Image (spheres, rainbow, N blue to C red):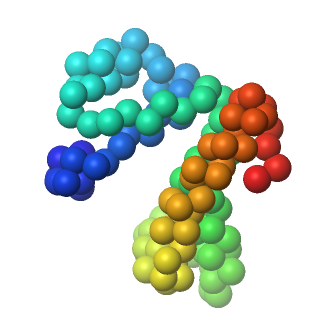
């Protein structure tokens, strides 16, 4: 975190998935809690995670490639190329949408949202 966010403004996002809430992960987070800010994420809300949007965009871009990737190395190259071809500002737009997404989730009391 200190390398990526040397300004100290980075936040750790925990999606509360079962593997991430295991005792060892929880203990590590508690031991390192002073190293970064922890963005508390409502349990069972993966649809609010921008990583899902990024993954879907990458997979869609790879599926549109011609010829399609046939080997693991072709897939890696296609993913890397697709990542480099992301429209400028796409990731920033997703990040900036998070406060609105979070408000929608709070209004839905942790349930499904239409956002």
The picture places residue 33, in percent across and down from the top left corner, at 27, 26
Quadrant for the N terminus in the image: top left
Q: Is residue 113 left or right of residue 59?
A: right
Instruction: Inspect this view and state whether residue 78 appears.
Output: no
Q: Is residue 108 left or right of residue 59?
A: right
Relative to 84, say whether 17 is above or below: above
Residue at the extreme top of the image, as rendered? 23
- Residue at 66 percent across and 29 percent down: it is 44
Residue at the extreme bottom of the image, as rendered? 66
The picture places residue 24, in percent across and down from the top left corner, at 34, 16
Relative to 6, say whether 112 is above or below: above
Relative to 73, say whether 32 is above or below: above
- Residue at 23 percent across and 19 percent down: it is 31
- Residue at 67 percent across and 71 percent down: it is 60
Residue 23 placement: quadrant: top left
- Residue at 44 percent across and 36 percent down: it is 39
Q: Is residue 8 left or right of residue 53?
A: left
Residue 53 placement: quadrant: bottom right
- Between 65 and 44, the residue placed more toward the observer is 44
Relative to 88, say whether 103 is above or below: above
Instruction: Inspect this view and state whether residue 27 appears.
Output: yes
Total numbered badges shown on the rendered structure: 0
């Amino acid at each position: 975190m200190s390398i990526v966010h040397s300004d100290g403004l980075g936040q750790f996002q925990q999606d509360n998935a079962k593997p991430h809430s295991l005792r060892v992960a929880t203990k590590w987070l508690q031991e390192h809690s002073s190293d970064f800010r922890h963005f508390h994420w409502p349990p069972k809300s993966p649809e609010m995670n921008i990583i899902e949007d990024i993954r879907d965009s990458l997979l869609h871009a790879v599926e549109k490639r011609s010829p399609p990737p046939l080997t693991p190395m072709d897939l890696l190259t296609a993913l890397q190329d697709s990542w480099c071809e992301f429209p400028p500002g796409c990731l920033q737009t997703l990040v900036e949408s998070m406060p609105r997404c979070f408000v929608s989730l709070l209004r839905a009391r942790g349930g499904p949202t239409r956002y």
